[in-house]
Amino acid sequence: MNNFFKTSLSAIMFVVAVAAVGTSCKKKFDAPPAEAPAVSMTANTTIAQLKARHTVSGAIDKIDSGSDIIIRGIVIGDDRSGNLYKTIVIQDTTGGMAVLINGTNLYTSYPIGREVFIKCNNLYLSDYSNQIQLGGGIQAGSAPALADISTSTINNVIFKGTFNNVVTPKDVTPAQLGTSMQDKYQNTLIRISNAQFRTADTASTYASAGIISPSAASYDLEYCANISSPAGLANIELRTSNYSNFAATALPNGNGTITAIYTLYRTFKQLTIRDASDVKFTGPRCGFTPPPTGTVLLNENFESVTTTGTTPIALAGWKNIGPTAGTSYLGKTFSGNKYAQVSAFNSTVSQQLPTVKSWLITPVLNMNTTTNEKLTFGTIDGFNNGATLKVYYSTDYTGGADPTTSTWTQLTATIASGTTTGYAPAFVGSGNVSLGSITGPAVYIAFVYEGGYSPSAKTTTYQIDNVLVVGD
């Protein structure tokens, strides 16, 4: 069984014994010992360099050097929630490592965010089915295995540094995660967007609390590249211990982001979360609104735009009109998907315009050749503080540089809203916006953004993708 989730009968018996003797009417608790000052050491080896010493799957390699081999890492996984057992996971800028320790309540000494230094000389490297681990020795038996670092030696090899260090998860797609022992993402903190549980699994809980065998539950994840792509299995699973304190929590039914420690079992990709708050599946499920079918009048997914991050969108037939290049609609990309983005935000005072009104206008549409036309698109809002995005149509605009001289009528569509911190986890569908009452040989649709810095900052970021107009 994986060391992340193995259980110990002796540990269970210890808890029972403590409960049996802990029933006195009067209880006196000793104050916890004062925390020693954080040490300051110099690492001479990266985690990636240390892991490179282990090249043969299943081997147990003693770290034997004439001088100290010291690594430094930040704890990204502890046992507070019970989803890790006798294990902490540390990460530096080069990689991550699971460290096996013969102890419980490790989070009281090595909580997430704590800096640690490890003197690795005379410790051992091995792997559990391709997941590299650092331990304290070799367990005897018919099949020798890596042993935990003992409590009698832990203070001689693991040294406590500063608290509250932040490790930012790396945004990846499932396809970027490799299956080799030396994969750079193994035992590091990663984040996947546009993910969700299978519909059939959303009636389940993260794990089966109280069940001993099997000791963990696994669920396959689905992944969508963008709002219009159908949900597909991501070839990656979330594995959760039955002993975690969130085992009985229901799986969320939405789509969004998952932050997790990436692990391997042989060649199977697995994710381990620290607690249920790492899963933010609160948005609409991907593929939730099949696009309408019929005669296609417009289909723009922005996959051909330049995505330097500062380049205004320039597509044939489209008009991109903003006060400055930076407040025009820009080509952006995330997780392999391209889209249009607009914001009034600018970091320099000279560019903080009092008012910003930016237009992204479609090519001309002939609405006399079809009937019952419908418009669909997707939006994401980010750091929403009041700027607006609205959709209009015009039958008298002629394609000029000043659209304000024409008549524009607002359309009713669902626009992403309410994401005040970060970005919405997935594109929100507009719904089928009816254009059936609009006629004429020259109709335009405009996405109009309004924000600015006066009288207060309204700098919400909006992203737009998969603009589709079809008719019968």
Image: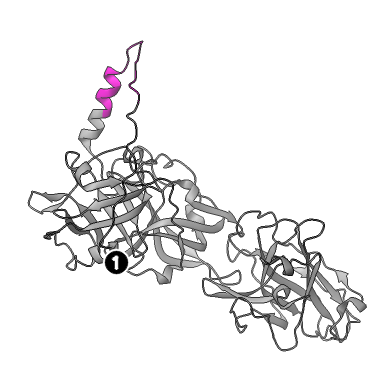
Question: What x and y, as percent, mark residue 313?
Answer: 68, 81
Q: Position of residue 320 (x, y in %)?
A: 75, 80
Residue under the point 62% across and 83% down: 305
Give the residue type at disc 1.
Thr
Q: Which residues are magenta?
A: 15-31
Give the image quarter of residue 355.
Answer: bottom right
Say which of 365 and 385 sits in front. Answer: 385
| Residue 370 visible, this orientation | yes
What crowding class fits label 1: few (fewer than 14 Cα within 10 Å), some (14-19), or many (20 or more)?
some
Q: Is residue 304 magenta?
A: no
What SS does tag 1 mark?
Answer: loop
Vertically, is 56 above or below 138?
below
Q: Position of residue 219 (x, y in %)?
A: 41, 55
Q: Which residue is mark 1?
A: 267
For residue 51, what is the image quadrant?
Answer: bottom left
Which of the 4 image quadrants contains residue 50? Answer: bottom left
Left or right for 405, reference 124: right
Q: Is residue 48 left or right of residue 432?
A: left
Query: Would residue 214 be seen by someone viewing this image from the given angle?
Result: no
Q: Nearer the viewer, residue 255 or 397?
A: 397
Figure coloring: one colour
Image quadrant for the C terminus? bottom right
